[in-house]
Amino acid sequence: MDAILFLAFAFVAVGCAVNLVLQKHPVSSALSLIGVMGSLAVLYLLLGAEFIAAVQLIVYAGAIMVLFLFVIMLLNAGAERKVKGRSLISKLIGIPAFLAFVGVVAWLIETRYVNAGALVHFGGFTGGGPLEVGRSLFTTYLLPFEVTSVLILIAILGAIVLARKEFD
Amino acid sequence: MPPLPGMPPIPQNVPLSWYLILSVILFGLGTCGFMFRRNLITVFMSIELMLNAVNLSFVAFSHQMKAVDGQIYSFFVMVVAAAEAAVGLAIILTVFKNRQSLEIDEVDSLKN
């Protein structure tokens, strides 16, 4: 059952990611990215990370993607134009380089990583609920957590400064 | 469920390496999108795809190590991605305001 769920959602994720790269229109790409994030949330549940799965759906697929779609519609972004004169080399080696990268890293994982064959089964790790994550976040990782709040404050200020209207 | 004739038997549980290889594939596709697409927003979404791929391997390692730390890291990655999306989209708005275009090839003031 685990394997079937994994394979189904892995195929959905890869298919949506391929669609993201191939689509010409940004709205289609954004919808594909939502598909990737949803299926990754299911994989997180399979791995026992319930809190991260919920955050993935609420923050990523909810908030960030709505921001993306909002900007796409605000700017009225259309499909990409065809541009001539792109370099021949990039067309020729793009796909083979991607396949070589995936092949080499997959081979390295399978042969060199000692835990590669360890079986992942649902319920094998139950320490991913909000209780455990919150406890770890507010004890071991308290300083990074607080620094993160400063980072978000700076990001808000930066976004406001960049996007405001110029007053003459 | 009995296995269908002619099909390879599906294992009951998946090895950890499958999750890592899925993560590699998604990361590679994100890199391809980052390099091939010329729309500023699509390039930005490819970066988000790469961040998601890395998150998947963090959570898979967390399951393997039976420790919650990997999930905390992926939580921080999500926070940074949210901040990055806010600032990045503001930059895209500014670029569009100045050039009336989202083509990445036209933003080449620093070239040569």
Image: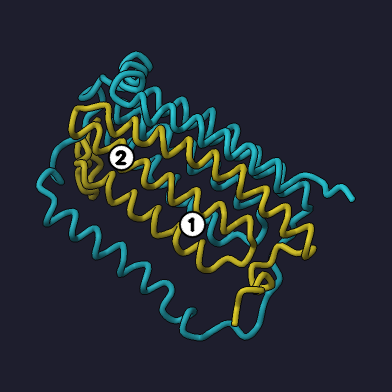
Q: Specify the chain shown as cyan.
A: A
Residue drawn 31% across the image and 19% down it? A139
Q: Position of residue A140 (x, y in %)?
A: 28, 23
Residue A108 coordinates in the image, percent (x, y): 18, 59
Is B69 on the left-hand or right-hand side of A52? left
Q: Which residue is mark 1?
A: A18
- Helix, strand or loop at mark 1: helix
| Label tally | 2
Look at the picture and state if B29 lies above or below B63.
Answer: below
Q: Residues within 10 Å of mark 2 (few under 14, many from 20)?
A: many
Q: Which residue is mark 2?
A: B58
Residue farthest toward the left in the current orientation of the protein: A114
Chain letter of mark 2 equals B
Q: Amino acid at mark 1?
A: Val
* Label 2 SS: helix
Which residue sits furthest front? A168
Q: Amino acid at mark 2?
A: Phe
Residue B73, quarter of the rendered image: top left
Chain B: what color? Answer: yellow
Q: From the viewer's side, name the closer residue of A69 and A8.
A: A69
Quarter occupied by residue B3: top left
